[in-house]
Image: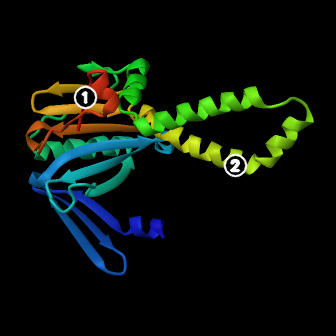
Amino acid sequence: YNWIVWAKTWISVQDEAIVIERNLLNRKVNTIGIKNISNINMEQNIFERIVGTYKIKLDTNSVTTANETDVKIILSKNMAEQFKQQVMLRMNEEYEEVLDEKVEYDVEYKVKDIVMHCIYTANPVSVIFIIAFLVACMIALNSVNTGAAVVDGIINVLGSIIAIIFVVGSVVQSLIRDFFVYYNFKARRKENKIYLSHGFFKKRQYTIAVDKINAVEMVSPVFSRILGRQYVK
């Protein structure tokens, strides 16, 4: 089905617009004005790295789609670079090859910095839950008898143990998720552009026009306030 859809899809970059035409059962033409594009971002997961493709994401100034990406297009690496270059040229913006690893960044986070970020933004309830779980495990280990009684006790509460493992696993996953999302975080400012790059399993590269930013929000969770930190949205 997807093969048929994309075989009947044409994408063209014109002087003032990007036109996406789809001729399946019904002909559908989506026209995006170049002047309405706020961000052109590139994303690449592990599979896309293997096959050599990039996902182009276009964000517009539309209020109705403010919390989601307006257009997603998967292209080969070379074609993705050409597509972004053509769009930015029509936006009268300077195009810079952000895929080049030799580009110098203003901010580069090491592994230690990302770990500390996860601690600063951790949910206090999750941390308390994990500490309580570890304390309970230590108390249980100190109070059990040796021999067959231990095996019988474990078998009797096996279901509860599995349930607790799943719960703790979900809590730990929420704590370490940001580590893989913001792994190798880099940021730089050049004139009217902010360039961001980060991600372990899914590499994300953002180009943000400063004059298209609608708001800047400073957030201080509990641990961040205690340790004198903030993060920016």
Residue drawn where x is 32% and y is 55% of the image:
72
Q: Position of residue 231 (x, y in %)?
A: 26, 31
Marker disc for residue 230: 1
Q: Horizontal placement of 10 versus 192: left or right?
A: right
Asked if residue 24 is positioned above or below residue 136 in the image, the reply reads below
Residue at 28% across, 77% down: 27
Q: Position of residue 18 (x, y in %)?
A: 19, 58
Q: What element carries label 2?
A: helix
* Circles 1 and 2: CB atoms closer than 8 Å: no
Instruction: Using the image as rendered, state which of residue 15 and residue 121 is in the foreground.
Output: 121
Regarding mark 1 in the picture, which secondary structure is present there? loop
Image height check: is 180 above or below 29?
above
User: Residue 111 appears in which quarter of the rendering?
Assistant: top left
Report which residue position mark 2 lands on. Answer: 160
Image position of 145 (left or right of 120): right
Horizontal and vertical percent position of residue 199: 40, 34
